[in-house]
């Protein structure tokens, strides 16, 4: 039984400026996939690229691929070419972005640099509810530093009040992975800079989800994932942003604040020099041998963004989440569901979350029915929306499936 919908989904689909992009992805039609914020869908051009990387580049050219077609297709500069594509999406210059390793490792690199630059102001402020890996990396780094730092936490709704002069650096995630609440990165960064506090932003749920303007905000460092909204595939390499002003240490003779100083971030790796001397730009934050196969997939996947106006993408994202929230409204009246994602557009990422006392069981039932979202402890139902491949009809199907599960229909 189909209940009359409060919005005309067909009309919204007809007006969708990004509807042609869905054809560039493999989107299984037997499910509604609301988990592009955990693992983005496969762009159709990626398998051929992976085959080429394996068969020709690896199989035939072998080690010559490191320098073959120097600068245009060679493996050596692949991280830099991927960095340039990501830079456009996050408001950075290409030489301020390094690609490789995981988000966790890049968080370590960024934090180590920020904590070094912070000098004697040894308080690191972070979010009580931050994503676990962010907290764990900060704890591990503090252990390495002999517990000489205080790791202070606050709710992400109350950051401004905690930006005080003894804080040296902050580590925050722009969009809360549970609630979908988006922070005012521009205002918070400006406040931090005013007090001489260095900012490290985790863009795991931002990059590729809406326009990000790191340099416009004056951010110092940022990290983010390649496999979420950037669709680079499971375990895709992550990125690290370092503002140009921090690439070189102020002290002459003291190399840039790079602590995982690996040979692939050296100015001339094959010089085999005894001491580390950093490569130009953020390339110095590339540590070891680039993960060529997964970088190839990410490089190819990023091409789907080439003709996308990120402000149009943001409009669609908000329209998708608005539509979902309005279709869910009758269910919120009837069931113990509480919307935890802000209604205010400026405070919303590209996901919608509800609390439900039996969230884990509800999500299990939803997944059995082909409505793929996430359960997040302790009681969150999380639904991610990816404007490049979602239609408004998907939103309608999702709401119908959720209603069926909550109403206990077979
Ligand atoms: C997904 C996510 C990560 C993932 O880190 P990995 O090292 O890629 O596992 C980090 N931070 C946040 C906020 C995330 O949502």
Image (tube, grey):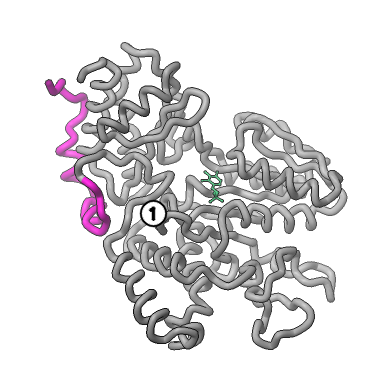
Q: Check disc 1 and report its element: helix, strand or loop.
A: helix
x and y, in percent, of residue 157 in the image? 60, 30
Q: Quadrant of residue 345?
A: top left
x and y, in percent, of residue 96 in the image? 59, 66
Q: Are there few (<14), some (14-19), or many (20+) residues within 10 Å of tag 1?
A: some
At 37% from the left edge and 50% from the top edge, which residue is drawn?
40
x and y, in percent, of residue 260 in the image? 71, 64
User: 58 and 244: which one is in front?
Assistant: 58
Q: Quadrant of residue 317?
A: top left
User: 83 and 187: which one is in front?
Assistant: 83
Residue 17 seen = no
Q: Is residue 398 above or below residue 252?
A: above
Image quarter in which the N terminus is found = top left
- Is residue 11 rendered magenta in the image? yes
Residue interval drawn in magenta: 1-28
Q: Left or right: where does residue 206 sit relative to residue 158? A: left
At 64% from the left edge and 52% from the top edge, which residue is drawn?
107
Residue 255 seen = yes
At 73% from the left edge and 65% from the top edge, which residue is drawn?
258
At 61% from the left edge and 39% from the top edge, which residue is drawn?
132
Q: Left or right: where does residue 291 sit relative to residue 24? A: right
Q: Residue furthest left?
A: 1
x and y, in percent, of residue 379 in the image? 48, 23
Image quarter in which the C terminus is found = top left
Q: Residue furthest top?
A: 334
Kindly identify which residue carries mark 1.
310
Q: Is residue 222 above or below residue 402?
A: below
């Amino acid at each position: 039984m189909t209940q009359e919908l409060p919005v005309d989904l067909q009309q919204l689909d007809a007006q969708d400026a990004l509807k042609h992009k869905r054809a560039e992805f493999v989107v299984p039609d037997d499910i509604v996939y609301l988990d592009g914020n955990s693992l983005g869908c496969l762009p159709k051009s990626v398998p051929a690229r992976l085959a080429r990387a394996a068969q020709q580049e690896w199989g035939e050219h072998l080690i010559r691929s490191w320098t073959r077609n120097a600068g245009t297709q060679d493996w050596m500069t692949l991280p830099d070419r991927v960095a340039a594509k990501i830079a456009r999406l996050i408001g950075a210059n290409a030489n301020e972005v390094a690609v490789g390793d995981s988000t966790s490792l890049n968080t370590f690199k960024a934090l180590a640099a920020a904590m070094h630059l912070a000098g004697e102001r040894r308080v690191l402020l972070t979010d009580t509810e931050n994503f676990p890996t962010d907290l764990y990396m900060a704890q591990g780094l503090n252990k390495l530093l002999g517990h000489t730092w205080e790791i202070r936490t606050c709710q992400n709704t109350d950051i401004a009040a905690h930006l005080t002069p003894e804080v040296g650096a902050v580590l925050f995630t722009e969009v809360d992975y549970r609630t979908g609440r988006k922070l005012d990165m521009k205002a918070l960064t400006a406040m931090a800079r005013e007090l001489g506090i260095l900012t490290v932003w985790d863009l795991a749920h931002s990059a590729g989800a809406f326009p990000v303007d790191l340099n416009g905000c004056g951010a110092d460092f940022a990290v983010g994932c390649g496999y979420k909204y950037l669709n680079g595939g499971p375990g895709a390499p992550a990125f690290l942003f370092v503002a140009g002003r921090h690439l070189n240490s102020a002290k002459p003779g003291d190399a840039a604040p790079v602590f995982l100083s690996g040979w692939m971030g050296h100015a001339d790796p094959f010089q085999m020099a005894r001491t580390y001397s950093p490569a130009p730009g953020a390339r110095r934050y590339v540590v070891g041998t680039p993960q060529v196969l997964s970088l190839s997939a990410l490089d190819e996947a990023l091409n789907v963004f080439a003709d996308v106006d990120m402000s149009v993408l943001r409009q669609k994202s908000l329209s998708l989440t608005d539509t979902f929230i309005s279709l869910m409204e009758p269910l919120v009246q009837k069931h113990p569901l509480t919307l935890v994602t802000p209604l205010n557009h400026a405070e919303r990422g590209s996901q919608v979350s509800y609390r439900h006392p039996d969230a884990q069981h509800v999500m299990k039932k939803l997944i059995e029915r082909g409505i793929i979202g996430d359960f997040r402890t302790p009681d969150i139902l999380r639904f991610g929306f990816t404007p490049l491949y979602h239609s408004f009809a998907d939103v309608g199907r999702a709401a119908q499936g959720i209603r069926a599960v909550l109403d206990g229909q077979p």
